[in-house]
Image (cartoon, grey):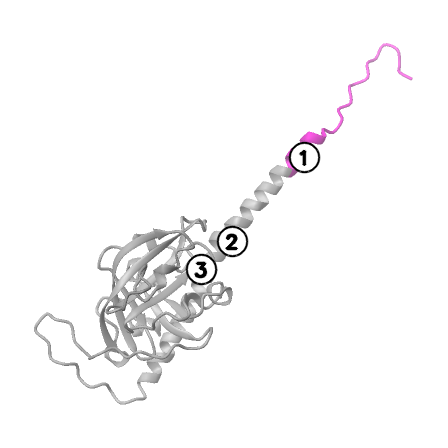
């Protein structure tokens, strides 16, 4: 019963559509926060972890080389020519998950170093300490043929995040237990994920007999997508034993690793 002469204030019911809208907005914010964590913060953490693991591996290799006799002096060369230490040492392909090399790319920053391990499955590419994987059956560092490597572009440490920034002649350097292998960047190629010919002994020519020592780096393209693949090629330039120290192009030194 109402009191005569007064008016009841209208009651406003809760709008189902309004509640649903607020829930969707909240869910959207949570999704964006998760993506930010996954693609940026988590990526940064994994990148730091992978770099630290590579630096530790480098220290172990360099500590070991101090216990063996020093390498013979390089062959004399003309003034201005690089030192020549003979044909590069080629190791046997290791077992799954075993570390092959550390990859240095000065173009990606003076502190860039990542470990290359055997295999391209998720236990390698999504690892907190590895991150870059060597395609099974492709050649080893310094071997005639194609040393082919895969890595994520924008997740799990983003080992090849800056692959599109290569410039002609940029050094691509591998450090192994045996020594330093320097390759020079030649070109980029964009292909579909099905274009497996990029890891042939002679890329995109499965029937050819290789005569050069090559390196191939593969990753996804564009960023945050797996629509296609971006491929960076390089050709072998020089080799030096571990005891001879890093090549001049590499500003990352043994002292910085300590």
**Which residues are the magenta region?**
1-23
Instruction: Determine whether 239 is above or below 39 in the image.
Output: below
Q: Mark 2 points at which residue?
A: 38
Pick whichever of labels 3 and 2 is earlier in the sequence.
2
Instruction: Determine whether 166 is above or below 53 in the image.
Output: above
Q: Main secondary structure of the magenta part?
A: loop
Say how many tags the image has.
3
Q: Quadrant of the N terminus?
A: top right
Task: Give the label on residue 157, or none.
Answer: 3
Q: Quadrant of residue 70?
A: bottom left
Pick the front one: 27 or 101: 101
- x%, y% of residue 34? 55, 50
- x%, y% of residue 83? 16, 75
Pick the front one: 132 or 138: 138
- x%, y% of residue 226? 45, 51
82 to the left or right of 207: left
182 to the left or right of 34: left
């Amino acid at each position: 019963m109402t009191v005569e002469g007064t008016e009841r204030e209208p009651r406003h019911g809760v709008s189902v559509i309004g509640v649903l809208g607020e829930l969707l907005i909240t869910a959207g914010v949570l999704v964006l926060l998760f993506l930010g964590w996954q693609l940026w913060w988590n990526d940064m953490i994994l990148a730091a972890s992978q770099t630290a693991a590579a630096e530790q591996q480098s220290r172990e290799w360099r500590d070991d080389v101090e216990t063996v006799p020093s390498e013979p002096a390089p062959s004399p060369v003309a003034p201005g020519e690089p030192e020549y230490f003979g044909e590069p040492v080629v190791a046997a392909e290791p077992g799954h998950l075993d570390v092959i090399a550390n990859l240095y790319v000065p173009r990606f920053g003076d502190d860039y170093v990542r470990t290359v391990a055997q295999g391209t499955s998720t236990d390698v590419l999504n690892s907190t300490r590895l991150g870059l994987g060597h395609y099974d059956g492709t050649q080893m560092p310094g071997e005639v043929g194609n040393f082919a490597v895969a890595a994520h572009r924008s997740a799990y440490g983003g080992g090849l995040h800056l692959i599109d920034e290569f410039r002609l002649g940029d050094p691509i350097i591998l450090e192994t237990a045996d020594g330093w292998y320097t390759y020079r960047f030649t070109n980029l190629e964009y292909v579909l994920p099905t274009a497996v010919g990029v890891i042939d002994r002679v890329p995109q020519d499965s029937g050819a007999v290789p005569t050069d020592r090559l390196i191939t780096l593969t990753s996804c393209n564009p960023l945050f997508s797996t629509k296609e693949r971006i491929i960076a090629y390089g050709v072998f330039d020089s080799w030096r034993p571990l005891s001879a120290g890093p090549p001049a192009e590499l500003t990352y030194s043994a002292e910085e690793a300590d």
